[in-house]
Image (cartoon, rainbow, N blue to C red):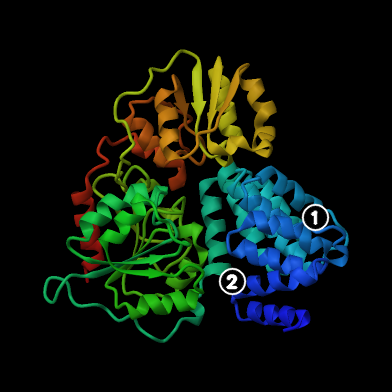
Amino acid sequence: MGPNTLYRDARRALAAQDVSGARTLLEQHLTTHPNDVSAHLDLAACCLTLKAPAIALRHASVPDAGIESARAALIKAKALRALQRMDAAAHALRTLLDSRRLSVELKLNASIELSDLLLNTFGDPEAAAAVLSQTRNPSLRERASESKLLAALYGGTQDATSLSKAFRRHAEKYIELSHRRSNKKPRIARQPGRLGKPRIGVVSPSLGATPVGFLTLGTLQTLSEKAELVFFDRSPGFRDWLAQGFRESAKDWIACHGLAPRALAEQMRDKELHAIIDCGGWTDIDALRALSLRPVARQFKWVGGQALTTGLDCFDGYLTDRWQVPPSSDHLYREPIRRFDGPYVTYVPPPYFNFSRGAKAKTGVYALVSNPAKISAATLTYLKRLKPRRLLMIDHRWRYQHTRDRFMRALQSVSGTVEFIVPNGHAEYLETLQAAPATFIDTRPYSMGLTAIELLLMGKAIVGPRPRAVSLMCERHSLGHQRTDDFASYHAQAAQLLRWCAEE
């Protein structure tokens, strides 16, 4: 077999999505054509897909890439990101986007990559929105619109009513698919209480050690005793102890990462569910698109991307409580409000959680522990009034130079002593919170969620500006959690959830 034949076969394998086979053929081809830049870059792309970023980086770093230099730069940036070299990846992407000789496709790809890095790694929603806005590419309009809305949500630059209306307009324009709704009606499962257990679906990209996992597993495990749970796993697959708990609660488990909305809706319809619960929300737009087609007779929105309304009318209930969404805020939601009698979430403590009281707060010592995206101007103004003698910044994102540089000047004007603490993993994070001799600062308008519960269980004090009179759910998370001392009411919550899902 000749070397040119090897390369042609590799390209055919790539077209057939046989990435592993293409990698083998490309490696063979490069033994006789070591200077073939295109083959090196194809191999680098294969290695990225096969989760071998170090090898991908080596093949993308070919000298004198010529007309392939932009493609090489993009693959290098993606490899650096996969290797957790985030600051270097951001620098490479910015350099690439500054290039005047960049194809539309590469510019689009690099813009999406940098925007995602800025938002989800560095916690910088304003910069993420700016990157997408600068491209002016029609195919990025939806992402750019959503990015601007997220920046406004985190920054508190709009009042709750205006922001809720803006998200609703976005959902109607970009997410709602019901104007092309299938004529097929949902097939309802067997009637509960007569012919067997009701079948209830749960769709989420976060079925593992995530806030969704910690805040829903206890209730769903209890619910599985009375109902058949069908999980639609929208992630590449968690393999931790919480993920195992979900799997043990499942009657059926459908791995559907990357599945298109209409295909996902068809899968939901085929399972003949009595009800389905969305635990993805704004973190899984394609799942919302699927649900907008009404594949299941009864649909509910619960934990997960639940900062505010989905903006869709396909839900029979937005599951919350009287603290998170008081009656005065009902008008902010397109969905009907359903309130649990107790808190809208429970908590499953990890085996490494030490429930003993943590270190006592020292006078003048404060800590900020939220995603830096939540540290708004309002939060900094409140913090400045406290005049902290020592300020602890606790979050894994502070390891990145971009994140520290963004806040350093503002933080130094607040406190003479600023310490960045970077825990490695959830267990170390909880140990750090427990040992911190600090009063903890809540953020506004997007407040603490899971961490507020964990701090309360440690006996830690939380202070912060109060929510506005009319406020979104995300602004009331911490306040709501402070109104209850019971995060283990799994049976009461499961019983109420079952009633909603099984009612006619």
Q: Is residue 491 visible from the viewing direction of this image?
A: yes
Q: Residue furthest bottom?
A: 183
Residue 96: which numbered mark, if any?
1
Say which label, 1 or 2, has the lower sequence index.
Answer: 2
Q: Residue furthest left?
A: 194
Mark 2: which amino acid? Ser
At which x and y percent is residue 84? Answer: 61, 46
Q: Which residue is mark 2?
A: 20
| Camera-side residue of 157 and 406 | 406
Query: Could you classify mark 1 by the number of other residues whose Cα lies within 10 Å: few (under 14), some (14-19), or many (20 or more)?
Result: many
Task: Name the element at disc 1.
Answer: helix
Q: Residue at x 53, y 64 (%)?
A: 171
Q: Is residue 113 visible from the viewing direction of this image?
A: no
At which x and y percent is residue 30? Answer: 75, 69
| Camera-side residue of 283 and 158 | 283
Query: Could you classify mark 2 by the number of other residues whose Cα lies within 10 Å: few (under 14), some (14-19), or many (20 or more)?
Result: some
| Camera-side residue of 137 and 428 | 428
Position of 135 with respect to 448 (left or right) is right
At which x and y percent is residue 193? Answer: 12, 71
On-image quarter of the C terminus: bottom left
Between the C-alphas of marks 1 and 2, the distance is: 28 Å
Quarter of the image where one finds residue 335:
bottom left
Mark 1: which amino acid? Leu
